[in-house]
Image: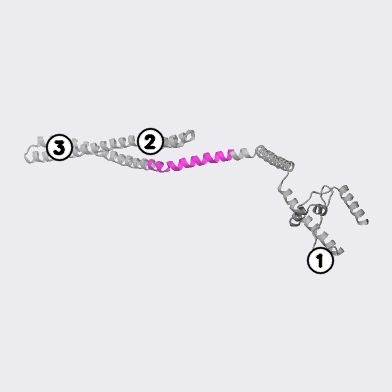
Amino acid sequence: MGIFQKLSTLIKSNINDLIAKAENPEKMLNQIILDMRDQLAKAKRDVAGAIADERKLGAQLDAEVKQAQAWQKRAELAVREGRDDLAMQALSRQQEHTQRAGALEQTWRAQKEETEKLKGSLRTLNDKIEEAKRKRNLLIAKQKRAQAQKRIHATMSGLSDQSAFDAFNRMAAKIEEEERRSLAQAEVTEALTGDSLEDEFLRLESGGEGAAMDDRLLALKAKMGLLPGGAPEPPRQLTAGGASAEAASAEDPEADDSDASSSAPVAPIQEAQLLEEFERLGRNDGS
């Protein structure tokens, strides 16, 4: 029993020491279980030897008992035949075998008791090895979890330093600044090249104001009674060259027909030229 207690203690100490020093716990645990199984095989051989010794002692005990019984019968035979001398010799031999049988019985009983204890220890050791095999994966999982927690703590300790976050914020600000500069450059380029979407809408809005001015001119003519029969008269437009559209239509009837069907927009007239046209109109009206 003491041998198996020492063996169990040695196995436990080896396990704790190897786990503490192991770089690869899974391989080490597998090796430990293999070593434990080897030790179990040796223990089985030792127990088998003890059982063989116990059975050998039992056979010797049975032989001594049989010899004692045999010499007892011979002594009785000698007494019946009147051979006391032979009876004395037979009783002497019977006593010797009986004494040896008594000693062997004590040894056999002690050996048998020890063998039963060894069998129990062997079963206990085998159960512990099987339990270790079942717990192997659990121990490996615990060790990996401990390593993961250690790495997480190390990472969190590193994140406690604000330098990484400051660097991240600086890079984010730099990227946003580059984006704003890119948008501003695109806006400047679009403004220089012209014909943007905003310019198109401005043209549409200016066209609407021109139509409103045409309506105001017609209303003014109607108020002055210059529209014959109440029919609206298309407004006469000044050309950029200084001559009115009406004069141009008088010289060129085909041009008048063309203007009647469609009035094309004219370029804006400078203020000095516009005042000169009004002075000409005033002189004509006075004459």
* Dot label at residue 34: 2
Q: Of marks 2 and 3, which one's residue comes earlier in the chain?
A: 2
Circle 3 sits on which residue? Answer: 91
Q: Position of residue 54 (x, y in %)?
A: 26, 38
Q: Position of residue 119 (x, y in %)?
A: 32, 41
Circle 1 sits on which residue? Answer: 230
Q: Position of residue 31 (x, y in %)?
A: 40, 34
Label 1: few (<14), some or many (≥20) within 10 Å?
few
3D distance between C-alphas at marks 2 and 1? 120 Å
Q: Which residues are magenta?
A: 129-154
3D distance between C-alphas at marks 2 and 3? 59 Å
Camera-side residue of 252 and 171: 252
* Dot label at residue 28: none
Q: Are marks 2 and 1 in contact (CB under 8 Å)?
A: no
Q: Position of residue 139 (x, y in %)?
A: 46, 41
Camera-side residue of 207 and 191: 207
3D distance between C-alphas at marks 1 and 3? 175 Å
Quarter of the image for the N terminus: give it. top left
Label 3: few (<14), some or many (≥20) within 10 Å?
some
Label 2: few (<14), some or many (≥20) within 10 Å?
some
Quick check: 231 left or right of 46?
A: right
Quick check: 92 left or right of 159?
A: left
Q: Residue at x 23, y 39 (%)?
A: 58
